[in-house]
Image (cartoon, rainbow, N blue to C red):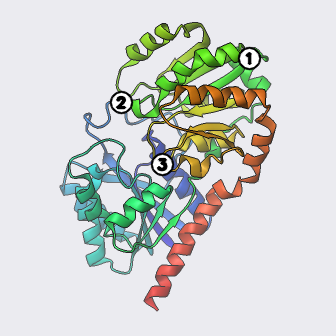
Amino acid sequence: MKIVMLGPVYPYKSGIAQYTGAMCTALAKEHEVKAVSFSFQYPKMLFRHTQKDEKNTTFRYEPVVYPLSTVNPLTWGRTAAEIRSGRADLLIVQWWHPWFAPCYVSILKDIRKKSPATKIIFVCHNVLPHEGFPMKERLTGKVLTKGDAFIVHSAQDAEDLKRLVDRPRFIHGVHPTYNQFKKKDLSREEARTLLNIPAEQEILLFFGYIREYKGVKHLIRALPAIKKARPKVRLYIVGDFWENNREEYEQLIRDTGTGEDITLVDGYLPDDEVEPYFAAADLCVLPYESATQSGVIQVAYSFGLPVIATDVGGLPEVVLDNRTGFVIPPKDADAVARAVIRFFEENRADAFRENIREEAYRYSWDRMVEHVDGLMEQLREDVK
């Protein structure tokens, strides 16, 4: 089968770019896959940080072309022509934000008119965005109604999809695991040696962009209670400050008296430097206030690392409570503290790690390829 993938890929450095590259690589084992990506993706008002990283090649995929500028309509027709030139059986579109609605609508109208045999599947990372956006439902609906089928990663996204598209054909699949970060297969001891972490310390890890909705402040507020019960605990916060508000977090750290118990690794972390933090940690803590799903959980699982996550969006569908981690209420520092203390006092690490291994196929890219093939088979049957 010939497949064209529309979405961000290397050198873009977002989690969705990583996902798209990994998906292309997985599908290319069985199909002919070409990626079509952006020459220009976001204006600075939507993405204040550097959008590209030429040095990070972990998720690089070829063949790929970069004709699409979201702000230049002259490129939209060229992008559609590029997609059509591959005579694809299937176009897979990565969807996550209504900013892309105008260019996507234009491109997909062209595909529908000039290549009607090409089927269109959307992979919906977020049907609707976390933050507010003008006319987000109307814009999203205009795009998604152009699809033949959909893959979503959370029950919330499935409900949003059904509100915007009449009787959509979709599969609710788990976000696959990112094994690509596991480059050296470091042991816990080797990783701790690299990071100068004593063997006896109990390491909590928050990883990813530090944004208000990700609830890092609740984790910081929980730390005094955790330290009282588990004096050897240390928290690593590894990520880039999205809103350029590091001072707020530093003030909170001072107010809670946790400065001696937190290591703050500020800035975008290259792919080659990710592994030691996950390999060295005992527990990943993601106290999000809201979410649809999280790629960080899948990075943690690739290292067999248990996760504490909040009961928001699709997180409890991936973090299996009492099996691969704990699911707790959002916006509750006391709940964070209780879950962390329970994890260590009940010695849950080995059991949770074993359960993560048992769930590995459910989180695999092979399973995602099966979802794509299954949807395509259904679409072909409709034509007969």
Residue 113, image quadrant:
bottom left
Q: Is residue 292 left or right of residue 321?
A: left
Q: CA distance from mark 2 to mark 1?
A: 33 Å
Q: Is residue 123 visible?
A: no
What amino acid type should be assigned to the residue bearing mark 3? Gly
What amino acid type should be assigned to the residue bearing mark 2? His
Name above or below for residue 260 compared with residue 200. Answer: above
Disc assigned to residue 164: none
Secondary element at image label 3: loop
What amino acid type should be assigned to the residue bearing mark 1? Gln
Q: Position of residue 179 (x, y in %)?
A: 65, 45
Residue at label 2? Answer: 49
Mark 3 or 1: in front is 3
Extreme residue toward the bottom, this view:
384
Dot 3 alpha-carbon crowd within 10 angstroms: few under 14, some 14 to 19, many 20 or more = some
- Asked if the residues shown at circle 3 and circle 1 are in contact, with their CB atoms under 8 angstroms apart, the answer is no
Dot 2 alpha-carbon crowd within 10 angstroms: few under 14, some 14 to 19, many 20 or more = some
Dot 1 alpha-carbon crowd within 10 angstroms: few under 14, some 14 to 19, many 20 or more = some
Residue 132, image quadrant:
top left
Q: Earlier in the sequence, mark 3 or mark 1?
A: 1
Residue at label 3? Answer: 313
Measuring 60% from the left and 50% from the top, which residue is drawn there?
318
Q: Is residue 39 left or right of residue 375?
A: left
Name above or below for residue 361 compared with residue 188. Answer: below
Count of numbered circles on the image = 3
Secondary element at image label 1: loop
Q: CA distance from mark 2 to mark 3?
A: 26 Å
Q: Earlier in the sequence, mark 2 or mark 1?
A: 2
Mark 2 or 3: in front is 3
